[in-house]
Structure formats: structure tokens, C-alpha cells
Amino acid sequence: MNLLHANDRQGQYPDSWYAATRRPLDPFPPLRGEVRADVCVIGGGYTGLSAALHLARAGRHVTLLEAHRVGFGASGRNGGQLGSGQRLEVDELEKLAGKTRAHALWDMAEEAKALTLALARDAGVSVRRGIAHCARTPAEVAHAAANAERLDRDYGYDQIEPLDREGLRAHVPAEIYAGGDLDHGGAHLHPLNLALGIAAAARDAGADLREGSEVHHITHGSASRPSVVQTATGRVLCDQVILAGNGYLGGLDGRVAARVMPINNYIIATEPLGERAQEVLRGGIGAHDTRFVVNYWRLSDDDRLLFGGGETVTYRFPTDIKALVRTPMLRIYPQLHDVAITHAWGGTLAITMSRMPYFARPAPNCLSASGFSGHGVALANLAGKLMAQAVMGQSEGFDTMAALPARPFPGGATLRWPLLVAGMSWFGLRDRLGV
């Protein structure tokens, strides 16, 4: 199944609240005929746009190919939460990579957050500070407190405030949580406007952005001949290729496909809540919880609740996304049973076995970064910058990420999906049972 076309209309953003409130940006033309570039970037989300921006600012001739519209995929559909650190907490990170590399990875993630905040500022995208992490059990509350202490003591990060039950309810007035923490260094924003802002900056820096240009085949080159990136209406001859398709990369590279699993997620937007917004969140923060199939939510600038959650075991979006996501929303906020849902949408992200991004060199003149596992608002922007730097011979950051263990999914690219269905069903059951 080609996920570029499984659930969406060609060249159109989904019917999301983000698309309805996006800033204007004129469409970019499709690729026609043959063009020559130093670098061809495949994918117009945060990763690809950041790579194109940093390459263009460095004077490289870069052509970016996007099958639909820039920001069409996960970059323009996600929960908009800008978290601190990597996807794994530091205790898990130390087990995976050792203490020295864990510190380097934490610092890189903070660099990613700073980069994304700077990109948002340059694009005029408003940012709200604070992300609450809502724990379901006393054991999870204790773990959150220990994690905050560890980050302060060992990593110099003092922005996380541990919260008991009543402390959390002062910020997130929901009865079902036992406590958690509040990351004052986290933030949330309008993700599609961020993508469009980066695209405009890349265009202004001289990048050649092409929409409606789905890549069908790549012939990797060598030192003596260019790579060829082929679409239905043209091709790019280039010295370097950057793969930035994430969950929509499909079969363009089998090694990446074996290690990066596309999954779907869903979000709803309510009508403006007015004074009732204080029953949901206080202080302008966003929130997420500790379920394996995570719930995440925040208030928009016009006080709508933007709530993400729910899982499906098919690549087709459900026929009633509103009903699917309304169920976990009401589990947390039953008082919202009479609130109207105005928008509902789905999107495709990508996960890895380790839940850490997968950085690789699929060919000598090709770089890839994907599998941000729900933590990509910051890390995807950094990934694009790191690949741009690697193209220019400064590969230390890219190589640090590429050195992480990256196991393929059992069954590889062919059989991974049935096994993921079984796993998601099991963890979904555990969530429902409160295990």
C-alpha cells in the first residue's frame, strides 16, 4: 500500500484545524524535465525543509521534491508539542548508549529544541511554554520525580517540576492521573505553520522547492557519475541524495524500510471552549500521558481542545475519526460530553524498534534520517541540519546518531506489519486494563 495516496487527496492538505488556520504560502511548481543540483532532498516535512534551508544558506544548489504539499505529512498534522530530550528518557538512554553518549544525545536534543524555537521565531509562529507529563500510577509518579532529579543532578537541566496528584491537578484538572511533572522548558505551537515558515525561508535562501513531485526511483551514483532521482514528469541529477520521507518513504530504500515502521495517529479539535477551557488546562501548557498509545492535548489560541489519541491496526484511516478519539478524550474529561467536534484528521508517522531515530547512509552519496517515534517536532529539524552538515563534510553530529543500535523489525519490511498489529493490540489492551 502506498501511504502517500491511501488516505488523502492528491496535493491537498487534510481537513485539519491546522490546514484551516494555516498561513498563506503560494504553491511550488512540480518538477518538469531534467534539472541539475548539488543535493536532491526527498520529502517536504521538517527534516527535508531544514536540510534544504541549511544547504541553501551554505550556498549549495538544492532541489527538494515533495509528492503533495510542503508540510503535508506528519510535520503538518502532529500534536505540536516540542518536548525536551530524546524520545527515550535518560535512564533508558544510558542503558542503550552508555553515559557518555547519553549526555551527548541529550545535548543534541536540547540543540534541536533551540533550533526549532529559533525557526518558529523567524517564521513568526507563536509558541506557548510548558508541557505536563501525566502519570497514571504512584510508581510512574515516583519515576517522574527520580527522572527530574537525575536530569538536574547529572545533565544540568533544572526545568522539570515534579508534581503530586494535587500539584498536577492545578495545571491539568483531570481526576484520572496520580501526578506527574511539568517541563517548563517544553513548548507547543502550530506545526503546519512552522513547516510553511521553514519552507518560505528555504525558498528565500535559494532552495528549489517542487511540490506534486513524487519520487518513483533512485539510481545512486558514484564519484564519477551523478545520482538520478526520477519522478513521473522529470528527474534530478545530483551529487548527493537526502531521504527525508519518514513514514511516507515507502519502498525507496529497503534497508530503511526494514527499520522504520509507519503507523497512523489521529487528532480532533473541539469548538472553542471559552471559559470552560480552564476545566481542561491552565497556564497555557500542553500535556501528554504515560499510556503506550499515548494521549496528548493542548489548547489552541482560540481555546479549542486539540486532542490526539486512539489506535487502529490498519493503514486505512477509520471512517469515524471523531468517535475514535472522542472516547479517550471523555475518559480524561467526561464533562466535555456535550462539546462539539469541529475537525478530525489522521496522519502517518514512523517508529523504530528502539524508539530512537534511525540515521543511515544507504549509499555512499545518500543520507537518511527517519523514525522519530512521535518526538519529531524538534529532532526532525535537527536531523535536516545534521544531514546538511554531513553533506558539507561536517558529519560528527550525524555519525553520533548513526552509531546508535538499529535493529530491523522482525520479518523485515515484508512481515513487520502483521507483527506490529499483534504488538499494538497487546499494548492497547494493557492500556485499557491500566497495566
Image: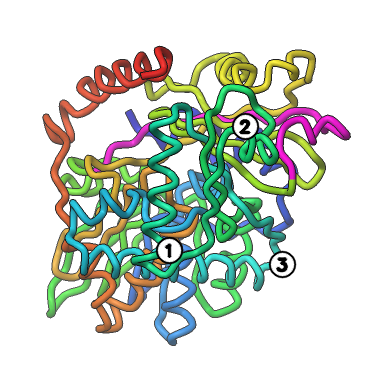
> In the rendered structure, which disc, 1 or 3, sits on the residue that comes first in sequence?
3
Front of the two marks 2 and 3: 2
**Where residue 312 sits: x, y (%)?**
42, 19
Please state the total of marks drawn on the protein image: 3
Residue that mark 2 sits on:
307
**C-beta proximity under 8 Å, tags 1 and 3:** no
Q: Please give left or right for residue 288 compared with residue 280 in the image.
A: left
Of residues 360 and 372, the one nearer the viewer is 372
| Residue 227 appears in the rendering | no
- Please report whichever mark, 2 or 3, sits nearer to the chain's N-terminal start: 3
Tell me which amino acid carries mark 3: Gly
Q: Nearer the viewer, mark 1 or mark 3?
A: 1
Give the CA separation, mark 2 to mark 3: 24 Å
Q: Magenta residues, as a range?
A: 260-282
Marks 1 and 2, how far apart at CA:
30 Å
Along the line of sight, which residue is nearer the eye, 379 or 97?
97
Colour scheme employed for the rendering of this structure: rainbow
**Badge 3 is on which residue?**
124
Q: Which mark is residue 152?
A: 1
The amino acid at mark 1 is Asp
Check disc 3: other Cα within 10 Å, few if <14, some if 14-19, many if 20+: few
| Picture residue at 36% right of the left edge, 44% below the top | 373
Compared to residue 168, the image places residue 429 above or below, namely above
Q: Is residue 329 left or right of residue 293?
A: right
Against 115, residue 165 (above or below) is above
Q: Position of residue 117 (x, y in %)?
A: 58, 67
Say what secondary structure mark 3 lies in: loop
Q: Is residue 42 magenta?
A: no
Quadrant of res 237 = bottom left
Q: Amino acid at mark 2?
A: Phe
Can you say whether 113 is above or below 341 in the image?
A: below
